[in-house]
């Protein structure tokens, strides 16, 4: 590794220890005050405040509640660092002293509990910390840094909303877009890979139409309950019978609703399903198969009209650029002890992070950071019970503060400096050439480190 990179890293990260109490209070504050997707007013305010204090040009209200901080620090590459800010409608059950007791009104007007069950509070804190440290040590690097706090990741809206609002008019076209996520794995460990990192996700609603009648007169009805039941079972044959053993996808029917009373055959049934895939061709085949099966089952039942399909949300496939992820991997392996940096398989979780790189056709790299107490994780692993550790989206999800907080700041800083600390970049490329690809190939489509969670 080039000296300039190591020197810059040392200078930027030297005050991290002093900054930790402030980051800890930012984290517990955001955790205790979670906000639903696209409602992140307070969190956005805190992010903007930190950026302004650190000397960034700050724009708020980008794509709703998004915040963009730009630091122009001489000639050189432009690096965009991204964090998401939204929480979930989950009732927190962690019992932590800073647990959320917040409720909010969702889009349907219902009062729901709110919790940072996916760790986006950690992401917000990491980015605030890295942005502060990089601004304090401006002499150590050169280029333009864009810190982007996005709303609405859990609803697949936020990245798109910021892009549609002209995100890239605030800073030059980035040379790389970097992002990270906390997950179940030993705290302080970092996992990533070249190529596919997060799955594509597609959710849809399907209305099946029948003809209602008295429960005692099936001859007068076209029963949408039976139609829906047959459809759900047959949908499970797509992955089992239409994909090859080497292809991967998930088809989950997460909601099936019909009828109100035991002796009334209803008029319609509504299915909501979610598809995960790792390959654009597999994705198309699965989505086509769903339509074919749903239409055919409706026809088989003699439905009075064809089913109605509504796409609910769509997350792009997350793909880590080859040379950019080799560069990130090289600086991580240089900075952290080797035991803390792992190659992972792609996770079945999905992210709208990929939208940023796709929009401008620039490389993007996304990685994972463990948040589970190392002892707890080691014991669970030894007992074969890693799946029992509360994962993202669980009401018990509770990353440990240390070393999770410092690790995510260190990864963002070192990854950014891989571009911003000049000649370090070329050195990292050389040392990583081929190496990372080889490892990624060897791991193929293995399981993700820790375990996957779904958005
Ligand atoms: Zn999530
Ligand atoms: Zn998340």
Image (cartoon, rainbow, N blue to C red):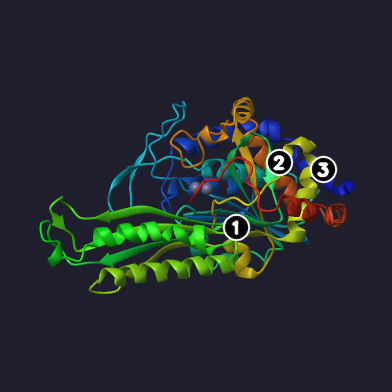
The residues tagged by marks 3 and 2 sit, at their Cα atoms, a distance apart of: 12 Å
- Residue under label 1: 245
Q: Give the mark toward the camera: 2 or 1.
A: 1
Given residues 334 and 247, the one toward you in this image is 247
Quarter of image, res 13:
top right
- Give the CA separation, mark 2 to mark 1: 39 Å
Q: Name the residue under label 2.
A: 410
SS type, badge 3: helix
258 to the left or right of 163: left
Q: Counting residues from the N terminus, which is met first, the one under dot 3 or under dot 2?
A: 3
The residue lying at 15 percent from left, 62 percent from top is 218
| Residue 334 vertical placement versus 378 (above, below) | below
Q: Residues within 10 Å of mark 2 (few under 14, many from 20)?
A: many
Q: Mark 1 or mark 2, which is nearer the start of the sequence?
A: 1
The mark lying in front, picked from 3 and 1, is 1
Which type of secondary structure does the marked residue at label 1 adopt?
loop
Q: Which residue is drawn at 25% across and 71% down?
A: 303
Callout 1: few (<14), some (14-19), or many (20+) C-alpha neighbours within 10 Å?
Answer: few
Q: Percent from the top left, x then y, of residue 179?
A: 63, 52
Q: SS of the residue at dot 2?
A: helix
Residue 283 numbered mark, or none = none
**Against 362, is 3 above or below?**
above
Q: Position of residue 220 (x, y in %)?
A: 12, 66
Q: Earlier in the sequence, mark 3 or mark 1?
A: 1
Q: Which of 200 and 154 is in front in this view?
A: 200
Q: In which quarter of the image is residue 73?
A: bottom right
Q: Residue at x 20, y 66 (%)?
A: 222
Instruction: Residue 62: tell me if it is visible.
Output: no
Q: Nearer the viewer, residue 52 or 39?
A: 39
Is 155 left or right of 220, judged from the image as shown? Answer: right
**Residue that label 3 marks:** 334
């Amino acid at each position: 590794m080039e000296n300039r990179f190591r020197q810059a890293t040392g200078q930027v990260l030297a005050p991290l220890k002093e900054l930790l109490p402030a980051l800890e209070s930012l984290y517990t504050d955001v955790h205790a005050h979670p906000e639903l997707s696209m409602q992140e007013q307070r969190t956005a305010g805190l992010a903007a405040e930190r950026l302004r204090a650190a000397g960034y040009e700050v724009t708020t209200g980008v794509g709703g509640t998004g915040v963009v901080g730009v630091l122009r620090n001489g000639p050189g590459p432009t690096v965009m660092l991204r964090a998401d800010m939204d929480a979930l409608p989950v009732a927190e059950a962690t019992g932590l002293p800073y647990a959320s007791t917040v409720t909010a009104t969702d889009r349907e007007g219902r009062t729901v509990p709110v919790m940072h069950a996916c760790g986006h509070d950690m992401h917000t804190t990491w980015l605030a910390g890295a942005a502060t440290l990089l601004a304090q040590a401006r002499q150590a690097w050169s280029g333009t840094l864009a810190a982007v706090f996005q709303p609405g990741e859990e609803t697949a809206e936020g990245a798109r909303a910021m892009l549609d609002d002209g995100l890239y008019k605030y800073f030059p076209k980035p040379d790389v877009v970097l992002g990270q996520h906390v997950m179940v794995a030993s705290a302080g460990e970092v996992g990533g890979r070249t190529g596919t990192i997060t799955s594509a996700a597609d959710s849809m609603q399907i209305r099946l139409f029948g003809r209602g009648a008295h429960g005692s007169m099936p001859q007068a009805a076209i029963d949408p309950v039976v139609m829906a039941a047959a459809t759900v079972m047959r949908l499970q044959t797509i992955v089992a019978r239409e994909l090859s053993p080497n292809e991967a996808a998930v088809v989950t029917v997460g909601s099936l609703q019909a009828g109100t009373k035991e002796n009334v055959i209803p008029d319609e049934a509504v299915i909501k399903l979610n598809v995960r895939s790792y390959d654009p061709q597999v994705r198309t085949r699965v989505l086509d198969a769903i339509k074919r099966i749903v239409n055919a089952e409706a026809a088989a039942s003699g439905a009075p009209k064809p089913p109605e399909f509504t796409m609910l949300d769509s997350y792009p496939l997350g793909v880590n650029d080859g040379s950019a992820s080799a560069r990130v991997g090289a600086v991580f392996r240089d900075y952290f002890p080797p035991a803390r940096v792992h190659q992972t398989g792609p996770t079945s979780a999905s992210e709208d992070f990929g939208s940023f790189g796709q929009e401008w056709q620039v490389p993007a790299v996304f990685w994972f950071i463990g948040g589970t107490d190392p002892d707890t994780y080691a014991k669970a692993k030894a007992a074969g019970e890693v799946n029992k550790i509360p994962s993202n989206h669980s009401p018990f999800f509770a990353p440990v503060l240390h070393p999770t907080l410092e690790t995510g700041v260190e990864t963002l800083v070192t990854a950014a400096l891989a571009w911003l600390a000049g000649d370090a970049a070329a050195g990292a490329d050389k040392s990583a050439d081929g190496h990372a690809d080889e490892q990624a190939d060897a791991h193929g489509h293995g399981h993700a480190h820790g375990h996957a969670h779904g958005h």
